[in-house]
Image (cartoon, grey):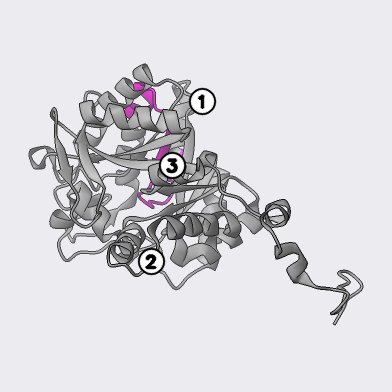
């Protein structure tokens, strides 16, 4: 069948396999490609010196002290990875119901940001704006007497956290909390202080997903969260129109970039966001996705290197401009071959 808008030659005049015959032709007509410039590398940082603690549920991923993180940053620079995303592992003694350590200007993340930018000014640094690593209850916000997460009071703390990170020299702040109005509040605070170059990557469509388990183990919020969940502020996995509303709001409030999280189970959301808004759109290949691929490869069920690159290419095909992935260094190595 043909149409006037897109005429197609019928077999045998039309043979689609002609364009698959050899490598140079496949390369010539490929619609999407993955490059090292598409990668953001999430890392876990902790206090101390010479501390390297493996995350058991994420083979190959460690919690690192700053002195051991610096060589990893150097690897990113050498590989051409443009951005490293920092996630803190906070000592239990510093966790409080109000998460006030999150905005300590001398806290772990501001110090790590300052050290990274001093040593590797060409490496982009992104920080998480959320309270769950800092709260004794493991939630991303402050609680009322009934245990419900308070929106506006939480936003006030998030603004302080973002300002502390920006003051330390971070390039991108990434609010991942899913509180209403936090992008506008952070943007206004940054502008008021003259931090006009600090970019905001909004976790605009962050779902209440079961794929976050290994990450919560890594940052230590799983134990504090216990049997509680985050469904009163993270999105329902059954919704997609709602994601577009969330993205629209964040763009209107001043987000420079938006994100969909998790990644591969939500590629339909990535595509809808990109088609609707045409703004820089990112996706997070989250800890559960990483753990599944690693386990399958270790069990001999999948070719590790092949599925890493194929999974990342899927994000690009769906419309993502970049991907946060724990495979970033692996992918960079493979892309250089």
195 lies left or right of 132: right
Judging depth in this view, the residue of 175 and 148 nearest the camera is: 175
Instruction: Report the Cα–Cα distance between label 3 and label 1.
Output: 31 Å
Q: Is residue 231 visible?
A: no
Mark 2 sits on what residue? Answer: 302
Mark 1 Cα shell of 10 Å, populated few (<14), some (14-19), many (≥20): few
Furthest residue toward front: 22
Give residue 277's position: percent from left, percent from top: 64, 52
- Examine the structure image and report whether residue 171 is included in the region drawn in magenta: yes
**Upstream in the sequence, badge 3 or badge 2?**
2
Q: Are marks 3 and 2 in contact (CB under 8 Å)?
A: no
Q: Nearer the viewer, mark 3 or mark 1?
A: 3
Question: Which quadrant of the structure image shows residue 101?
Answer: top left
Between residue 14 and residue 280, name the one nearer to us.
Answer: 14
Helix, strand or loop for disc 3: helix
Q: Which residue is mark 1?
A: 197
Quadrant of res 70: top left
Q: Is residue 301 above or below residue 305?
A: below
Looking at this view, is 15 or 9 the one in front? 15
Residue 300: % across, % down:
31, 67
Q: Are marks 3 and 1 in contact (CB under 8 Å)?
A: no
Which dot, 1 or 2, sits closer to the camera? Answer: 2
Q: Which residues are magenta?
A: 163-184
Question: In what element is the residue under mark 2?
Answer: loop
Q: Residue furthest top?
A: 118
Residue 161: image x %, image y %?
Answer: 31, 34
**Mark 3 to mark 2 CA distance (whole Å):** 19 Å
Query: Residue visible at 57% across and 47% down?
Result: 321
Relative to residue 273, is residue 51 drawn left or right?
Answer: left
C-alpha gap between disc 1 and disc 2: 43 Å
Q: Which residue is mark 3?
A: 333
């Amino acid at each position: 069948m043909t149409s006037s808008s897109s005429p197609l030659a019928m077999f045998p005049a039309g043979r689609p396999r002609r364009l698959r015959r050899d490598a140079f032709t496949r390369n010539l007509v490929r619609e999407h490609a993955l490059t090292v410039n598409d990668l953001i590398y999430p890392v876990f940082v902790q206090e101390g010196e010479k501390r390297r603690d493996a995350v058991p549920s994420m083979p190959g991923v460690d919690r690192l002290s700053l002195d051991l993180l610096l060589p990893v940053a150097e690897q990113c620079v050498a590989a051409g990875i443009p951005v490293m995303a920092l996630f803190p592992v906070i000592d239990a003694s510093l966790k409080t119901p109000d998460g006030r350590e999150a905005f300590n200007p001398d806290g772990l993340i501001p110090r790590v940001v300052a050290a990274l930018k001093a040593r590797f000014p060409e490496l982009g640094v992104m920080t998480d704006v959320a309270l769950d690593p800092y709260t004794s209850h493991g939630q991303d916000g402050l609680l009322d007497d009934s245990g419900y997460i308070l929106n506006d009071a939480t936003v006030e703390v998030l603004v302080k956290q973002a300002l502390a990170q920006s003051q330390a020299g971070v390039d991108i702040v990434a609010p991942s909390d899913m509180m209403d109005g936090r992008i506008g509040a952070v943007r206004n605070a940054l502008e008021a202080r003259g931090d006009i170059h600090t970019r905001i990557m909004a976790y605009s469509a962050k779902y209440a997903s079961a794929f976050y388990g290994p990450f919560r183990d890594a940052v230590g919020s799983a134990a504090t969260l216990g049997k509680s969940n985050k469904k009163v502020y993270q999105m329902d996995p059954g919704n997609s129109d709602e994601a577009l509303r969330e993205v629209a709001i964040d763009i209107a409030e001043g987000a420079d970039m938006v994100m969909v999280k998790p990644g591969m189970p939500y590629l339909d959301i990535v595509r809808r966001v990109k088609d609707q808004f045409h703004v820089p759109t990112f996706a997070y290949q989250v800890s559960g996705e990483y753990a599944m691929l690693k386990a399958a490869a270790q069990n001999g069920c999948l070719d590790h290197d092949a599925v890493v690159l194929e999974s990342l290419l899927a994000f690009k095909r769906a419309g993502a401009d970049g991907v946060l992935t724990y495979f970033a260094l692996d992918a960079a190595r493979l892309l250089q071959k």
